[in-house]
Amino acid sequence: MKNSSGDYAELVSLFEEFRNFIKPEVVDGVPDFSASAMEEQYHGVKELQERLAAINTSGWDTVQKIDFHVVRAEMNGVEFDHRVLRQWTRDPGFYNLTDGIYPRLLVHHSRSLSNWGIYNPEIPLSKEDVYDFQVKLQTIPKLFAQAKRNLTEAAGDLATIAIRVKEKDLQLLNSLAQQFADHHPELLPHVEQAKAATKDYRDWLIANKIKMTAPAGVGKENYNWWMKNVHLIPYSWEELHTMIQGEYHRALTFLKLEEHKNRNLPDFKLTSSEQENLQRQKETAAKVMNFLREQEVITVPEDLPPLPPEQYPRMWGKSAYLRPDYRGYFEQTNDREPMTNVLHVIFGHYYLGGRKIWYQEGDDRPIRGKIRLFDMHEARSEALAFGIEEWLMQAGLFDERPRSKEIAYIWLAFRTARALSDLRMHSNEYTLSDGIKNFSEGLPYPWADADGDAVWWDIEETLRAPGHSTNYIAGKNMMQQLMAERSRQLGKNFTLRQFFDEFMGGGIIPISLTRWELTGFEDQIKHLLEITDAS
C-alpha cells in the first residue's frame, strides 16, 4: 500500500476510485454478482478502507474532516453489504425488472446501471428507445438464470416479496405487449421471452421458497452497526424503539385532541375526479411555496419552476395495477387534505432523483455534491420532509385549514407504526406477516389494507433497507436537537431562514455531520468513533 500524502486531494481521488471500483463487471449484458466476483470486490473494498484509514487528517479543517467521514460511511456501507446484507445471495427481489436490477435499497447506489429498468413508456417509442427496450428485454432471461445460481442463502420472507413483485412485473410485460402490438411489433418476441423467463423465475421461487430458511432481518447487533457506522445515527436499537414508541403514542393522542377540537367543523370533502384532485394539489403546492417565501422559512429562488404534476403525491385513482376507483392510503389522506404530503414532497424531496434544482442546484463539490449510497441521502431527506410537516404546522401553515392538522397526525402514526415494524422485523421478533399486521392494524383508520400497495411497498422497503423507516423519526429528532442548539448559540439572531439555508448548504450528508459543521460540537462523531473502535 502506497504512503499517504495526507492532503485533501488524496481523499477526493480515493473517493472517485472507490465509486468506480464498486460498479460490477457487466458480462453478456448483465452485471456479474457471482460468488467469485463479489469476493474479489469485498477484498478490494477492504483495501480501500485501509488506505482511507491511513490518511492523516490532523491538519485538516472541519469541512474536510466531515468529507472524510462521509467517504468512510459509504465504504462502511459496502462492507456491510458484503458481510451482512448480501442481497445477491439472500434477496430474490434483488434481481428486479422495474427498479433496474436492484430493489429500492440500491436505486441510488452507484452500482445501478443508468436507466436499466423496464418501465411503461410513452408510445410510440423513438428509434433509440426501441433499441434500448430490445436490449433490456433480451437480458431478462440471463438475469434470472444468474439469480438461480447466486441465491444460495435466500430468506423466505424476501422470496415472498419477490413473488408478489414478479406478479406485477408480469402485468407490466402484458401491458407492454398490448402497447407494442400496434406500434412496435418487432419487440413482441422479446416481450414474450421476457414473460416466459419471469414466469419461470416466479415459479422457481414458489417451488423453492420452503428451502429458503434464512432470516430476513439482520439482527440487533448488525442493525446497530449499520445505523452507527453507515448512517452515523448515535442511537441503539433499544433507544430507537423507546423513541419511536413514544412518538407513536403522541401521534394518536394529538390526533384525538385535534379531532375533539374540530368536532363541530364540517367533515372532509373527498375529491370526485382526478382533475379535481390535481387542482386541489396544485393550489396547495402554490400555498406552500408562498408560505415559504412570505414567512421567510427558507430562501427560495424567484425563478424556481412550480412543482410538476408528475411529482404530486399519489394521484387520485392512479394506484399501480389497481382498479380505477380504488382509494388506498395515499388517496384516502390526500383526498381529504393534501397539505401534509405536498409539503413533504416539496420541502423534502424536490431536489432528489437527479433533478438539480433548488438547494442542490450547482452543487459541484466532489464529495458532498454526489447522491449518497445506501439510502444515506434518504435518511437525511426523509427526516427533513417528515419533520417539516409538523414544524410548519406549528408555524401557521395549516391555520386556515384546521382539519389538515388531523391528517398530519395520521401521517405521524403511519410512519411511526411502520418504523416499529422495521425495528422488530430486523431484530427477528417479527416475520414479514407480523410486520405487515402490526403496521396495518397500528393505523388510526383502516385506510391501508394489509394486502394493499401502501403497506406492502413500505414494508418491502424497510425489510430490504434496515433503518429506512426508523431514520424518519430518529433524523427528525436529531434535527430538532440541532435547531435547539443553534437557537441557543445564536440567541436573538436565530432565524428559521438562516437555519434551513445553512442546513441545506451543508450538502447531502448525515445529520450528525451537519450538526458538527454548524455548531462545532464533536460529541456525536466522537461517540460513534469510540463505538467503532470498541467493536
Image: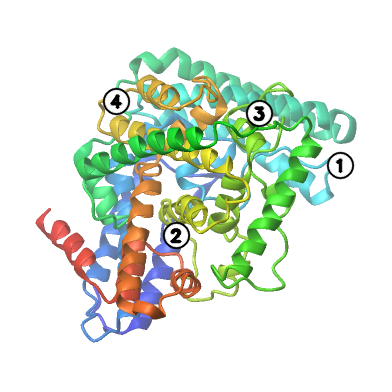
Q: What element carries label 3?
A: helix
The residue shown at (32%, 68%) is 515
Relative to residue 300, is residue 374 depicted above or below?
A: above
Q: Earlier in the sequence, mark 4 or mark 2?
A: 4
How did the renderer colour the structure?
rainbow
Residue 164 marker: none
Q: Which of marks 3 and 1 is nearer the N terminus?
A: 1
Q: Which of marks 2 and 1 is nearer the N terminus?
A: 1
Disc 3 + disc 2, Cβ < 8 Å = no
Q: Distance between the residues labelled 3 and 1?
A: 20 Å
Q: How far apart are marks 4 and 2 (CA)?
A: 29 Å
Residue beneath disc 4: 214
The residue shown at (85%, 31%) is 185
Residue 372 marker: 2
Q: Earlier in the sequence, mark 3 or mark 4?
A: 3
Is residue 418 something that shows in the picture?
no
**Label 2 is placed on what type of residue?**
Arg
